[in-house]
Image (tube, helix red, strand yellow):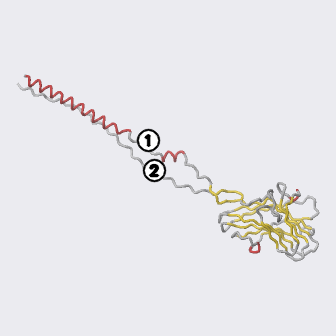
C-alpha cells in the first residue's frame, strides 16, 4: 500500500513588527527680544576726571550770554563737593546786565519713550544771599533732538535751591532728582546758573556735582539660554532604528521551518521510493 503522510500542523509564529514611534517636528523657539542695558549715560558726571583748558569737566561743554565776567573751573574746596574730591564751579562777577547765564551741557544717546532718572547735587553762593533769597538760581533744560544751542531750549526747570552767603564756612549741599522721557534718539542736558539783577560788585558762584542720567543705553543684554526642559524638547529622539532587526529575525525563523519541512518530505520520498 502507498503511504500517504499526513502533514502535521505547524504553528507558525508571526513575528511582531516594531511600530516606529512618530517623531514630532521640532519647533524652533522664537528668539528672545534682547532687553536694553540700564546704565549711566553721562561722561564724568562726578567731575572726578580731568578738566579741559576752558575749565569744564572732560565731556562737558560750556555756554554763557555775556554781560559779566564768567569763570569755569575745577573746584576742590570740600564744602562745595558732594562726593569725591572735585566738583564743577561756575562763577559770575561784575554783572552789568540783568539775567546773566552761565552753564555746562552734554549730549547723550537715548532710547525714545523710555524713562531716565536725572539726579544732581550742588549749591549756590552769592554776596547778596539772605533768607529767602531769589536773586540767583540754578536750572536745567534739555534739547530733545540733541542740539547744543542752549537758547533753543523751550523750557527750563528750577532746581529749588536758594543761594547761600558767600562767606558761610559750611554751606549746605542741595540735591535734586526727576524723571525724563526723551522723544528722540539723543538729547542734550543743560545745567545753568542764573543771576537776575545787575550788581556791579556782586559775585555769584554755582557748584555742580554728582550729575547722573541713568536708563536704557540702547545696548542688548546677553540672549538668555534655553531652559533645561526646552533643550530636551528640541533634542531629536535617539535609537529610532532600534526595532528594525526584529523583522529580519522573524524571516530567519520562517526559513528554518520551511527547510525542516522540506527535509521531511525528502526523507519520506526516499523511503517510499525504496519500498
Quarter residue 159 falls in: bottom right
Residue 29 seen in the current view: yes
Q: Is residue 2 above or below residue 154?
A: above
> Residue, x 74% and y 74% (percent of image)?
152
Residue 191 seen in the current view: no
Residue 75, how many percent across, how many down?
A: 86, 60
Q: Are marks 1 and 2 in contact (CB under 8 Å)?
A: no
Image quadrant containing the N terminus:
top left
> Residue, x 12% and y 25% (percent of image)?
270
Quarter residue 19 falls in: top left
| Image disc number at residue 26 | 2
In the displayed orientation, state which residue is furthest to the top: 275
Q: Label 1, on which residue?
A: 238
Q: CA distance from mark 1 to mark 2?
A: 14 Å
Badge 2 density bin: few <14, some 14–19, many ≥20, Cα 10 Å: few
| Image disc number at residue 167 | none
Element carrying mark 1: loop
Residue 247, how many percent across, how many down?
A: 31, 38
Q: Is residue 36 above or below residue 250?
A: below
Q: Is residue 34 above or below residue 17?
A: below
Element carrying mark 2: loop
Q: Is residue 89 above or below residue 237?
A: below
Amino acid at each position: 500500500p502507498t503511504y500517504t503522510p499526513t502533514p502535521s500542523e505547524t504553528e507558525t509564529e508571526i513575528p511582531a513588527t516594531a511600530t516606529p514611534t512618530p517623531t514630532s517636528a521640532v519647533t524652533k523657539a522664537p528668539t528672545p527680544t534682547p532687553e536694553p542695558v540700564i546704565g549711566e549715560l553721562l561722561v564724568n558726571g562726578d567731575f572726578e576726571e580731568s578738566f579741559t583748558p576752558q575749565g569744564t569737566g572732560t565731556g562737558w561743554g560750556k555756554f554763557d550770554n555775556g554781560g559779566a565776567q564768567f569763570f569755569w573751573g575745577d573746584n576742590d574746596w570740600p564744602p562745595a563737593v558732594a562726593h569725591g574730591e572735585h566738583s564743577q564751579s561756575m562763577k559770575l562777577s561784575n554783572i552789568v546786565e540783568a539775567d546773566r547765564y552761565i552753564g555746562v551741557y552734554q549730549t547723550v544717546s537715548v532710547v525714545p519713550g523710555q524713562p531716565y532718572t536725572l539726579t544732581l547735587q550742588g549749591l549756590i553762593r552769592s554776596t547778596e544771599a539772605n533768607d529767602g533769597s531769589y536773586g540767583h538760581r540754578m536750572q536745567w533744560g534739555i534739547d530733545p533732538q540733541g542740539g547744543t544751542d542752549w537758547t533753543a531750549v523751550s523750557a527750563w526747570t528750577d532746581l529749588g535751591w536758594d543761594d547761600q552767603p558767600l562767606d558761610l564756612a559750611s554751606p549746605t549741599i542741595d540735591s535734586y532728582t526727576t524723571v525724563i522721557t526723551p522723544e528722540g534718539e539723543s538729547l542734550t542736558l543743560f545745567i545753568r546758573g542764573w543771576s537776575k539783577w545787575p550788581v556791579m560788585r556782586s559775585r555769584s558762584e554755582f557748584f555742580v556735582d554728582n550729575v547722573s542720567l541713568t536708563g536704557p543705553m540702547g545696548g542688548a543684554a546677553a540672549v538668555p539660554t534655553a531652559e533645561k526642559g526646552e533643550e530636551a524638547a528640541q533634542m531629536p529622539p535617539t535609537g529610532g532604528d532600534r526595532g528594525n532587526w526584529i523583522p529580519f529575525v522573524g524571516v530567519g525563523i520562517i526559513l528554518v521551518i520551511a527547510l525542516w519541512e522540506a527535509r521531511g518530505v525528502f526523507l519520506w520520498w526516499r523511503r517510499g521510493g525504496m519500498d
